[in-house]
Amino acid sequence: MDIHGLDRLPKVEIHLHLEGSVEPSDLQALARRNHLPDELWSLNAFEEKYRYADFAGFLGSFKFITEHLITPADYGWIATQLIDRLHHMQVLYAEIFVSAGVVLKQKKDLDAVVDAITTASREREEQTGIRVNWILDVTRQFGVEFAERVAEAAVRYRESGLDNIVGVGMGGDENSFPAHEFKHVFDEARRHGLHVTIHAGEVAGPQSIWEAIEVLGAERIGHGIAARLDERLMNHLKARSLPLECAPTSNLCTGVIQRIEDHPLKMFYEHGLRVTLNTDDPALFHTDLLREYRQAATHFQLTPRDFAQFNRNAIEGCFAGPSEKMEVLRLFEERLRGLENAQEVNGG
Ligand SMILES: [Zn+2]
């Protein structure tokens, strides 16, 4: 299979934010629907809000999007839009973050939002077969109290049988509050069977990744690009088979790397780390999953065989239960074999 076949490659994505996937045109539709102060803005004006110079600016753009999500139905609608796009890109399974901390901070009804998005994802699964699980995300700079409320809600949903809430994550400003302040939050989540992934080593250094693992019990690391600066940490990640949720375009857009070639994706992969490839906030980073694959193929000379391995890494490291994970792996291998057989027949 060559680079042109990447659109047909079955895929899995495990680092993706619901709110960061809202395209400017959808935001304009939300502004009109909810009669917000910017309901008369041109599409161009909304697109302008998706431009920023650094990580702080990016957080501002993310917040701007969340301010347009007024009703639970808005959340359900953007979930459907996103999941349909993923399905179109041959994604078999996705784990999506919803910024539950933002929902609480903006005094929206988290129960109703979670009901809307999980209902939307179940409907899309019935219609198209794509599987989606959700991770409730804590916004680090909101502090520990909001984190506690997010984790408590996740535990409550899990215990009420909402089994597509699979984990609790933490994103936002990594330099705002130290990891130890959140330790009890993530301990409690894990004690109730929820999985944990932490954005670390994105804007901060290797120490932040160590703390995510050793203090917060992270089972996956969001980004983790600072691990490139610490050989002992890379060896530890390898020994623990801890997946890294890499998203090169994201790191370029937020200014934590200067050129795509500076991203350690390939170096991590060659070091034997469990690398996965993701979009993070596709609308805010003007990307999609296929574009990430093509870019990685071009800049890192990665082949479809490497991408198949990234996807196996994502399936092994995903937070689905054992039987769902096996089913996703089976589907993935079946689709991959079908693709390879078709190419042989066509001499591709
Ligand atoms: Zn992220």
Image: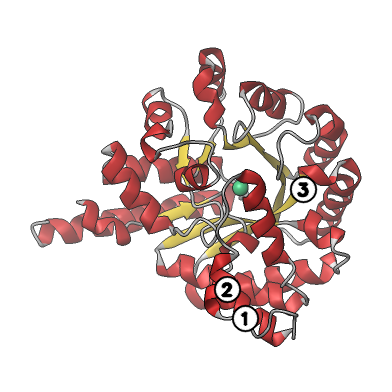
Residue tagged 3: 138
Crowd around label 1: few <14 · some 14–19 · many ≥20 (10 Å)? few
Q: Which amino acid does label 3 sit on?
A: Val
Cβ–Cβ under 8 Å for marks 2 and 1: yes
- Measure how far apart labels 2 and 3 are at the Cα level: 29 Å
Residue tagged 1: 41
Whether label 3 lies within 8 Å of ligand 1 gets the answer: no
Considering every residue shown, the one lying at the far right of the view is 145
Q: Quadrant of residue 299?
A: top left
**From the viewer's perspective, is residue 237 above or below residue 188?**
above
- The number of callouts visible is 3
- Measure how far apart labels 2 and 1 are at the Cα level: 6 Å
Upstream in sequence: badge 2 or badge 3: 2
Residue tagged 2: 45
State the image coordinates of residue 283 (x, y, percent, origin top left): 53, 62
State the image coordinates of residue 75 (x, y, percent, origin top left): 70, 72
SS under mark 3:
strand
Upstream in sequence: badge 1 or badge 3: 1
Considering every residue shown, the one lying at the far left of the view is 347
Whether label 2 lies within 8 Å of ligand 1 gets the answer: no
Crowd around label 3: few <14 · some 14–19 · many ≥20 (10 Å)? many
Q: Nearer the viewer, residue 146 or 309?
A: 146
Residue visible at 69% across and 64% down in the picture = 64
Q: Quadrant of residue 61?
A: bottom right
Q: Is residue 204 visible?
A: yes
Q: Which amino acid does label 2 sit on?
A: Ala
Residue visible at 52% across and 19% down in the picture = 229
